[in-house]
Amino acid sequence: MTPDTLDHVALWVADRDRIADFLTGHVGMHVVERTDKFTLVGSDARHGKLTLFEAEGPRETGALRHVALRISSLEDAERDLPSELELERRGAEVYFDVAEGLRLGLVEAPTEIEYDLDHVALWSSAPEETAREYERLGFGPAKPGLSGAPRVEAGGAFVEFQQGEPGDPERPLLNHLAVKVDSAEEHIAEARDLGLEIADIVDAPNTYAVFVWGPERVKVEYVEHKPSFSLT
């Protein structure tokens, strides 16, 4: 399993337009694609994105602690945030609640693309063990961030495991994490060789992907962009 980058974080939400409006109005993203089932938002289609799947509410946060975006200037980024937001500061990072349990962060760090994915933080009942299991899924080892929690990385973006119970909600906020790969077919074969539980295989017009169940029932997608992938 050899992921190239963290491609997107997919969420189940009841009001995707409300969240998409916040993301496009305050954190430098635009709508990459909108269908009758989901809205894909990001600052660049070939970098980290959020996929908002329409689902019945209310949603429960479950395993998802927060999603953090990388920016070159926290001072500049904060100017675009609504003044009424309650901000939690941590060094060169700031965190805030958006809607439906979604908590976002902004992390000041060198970046090729503004508002790219910096990290996703998950609750885990056994963070160190979970990090090791993600390495088995192809993620690389990484040093902890400011929180001190164990991390893994894919293409310079991170998944962080904070101590806490992810639970098993009936209506989770987190749908899946997705990493970009060169060949979905190779990852299907590798997943079978490793004895991983395959949740689904999806051959879509612009992508080909395999979904596997990771630790603590977090679903991980290995997605290949087909030559027809031309979203902006």
Image (cartoon, rainbow, N blue to C red):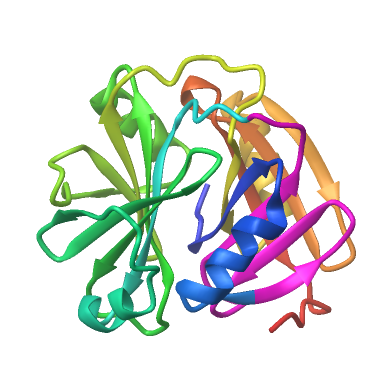
Q: Front-most of 85 and 4?
A: 85
- Residue plotted at (17% across, 51% down): 145
In the image, residue 43 above or below residue 15: below
Does the image show residue 185? no
The residue at 66%/17% (across/down) is 170
Residue 180 placed where, x, y %? 58, 61
Q: Quadrant of the C terminus?
A: bottom right
Viewer-proximal residue among 222 and 189: 222
Tell me residue 174's x, y (percent). Answer: 57, 37
9 sits to left or right of 212? left
Say whether residue 211 is visible.
Answer: yes
Residue at horizontal 34 percent and vertical 70 percent from the top = 70
- Is residue 57 found left or right of 120 in the rendered image? right
85 left or right of 197? left
Q: Which residues are magenta?
A: 31-58
Q: Of residues 82 and 148, which is closer to you in this image? A: 82
Horizontal and vertical percent position of residue 41:
63, 68
Residue 169 in magenta?
no
Residue 78 in picture, x, y percent from top left: 29, 74
Magenta region includes residue 43: yes
Q: Is residue 99 above or below residue 217?
A: below
Q: What residue is at 9 percent from the left and 60 percent from the top?
A: 91
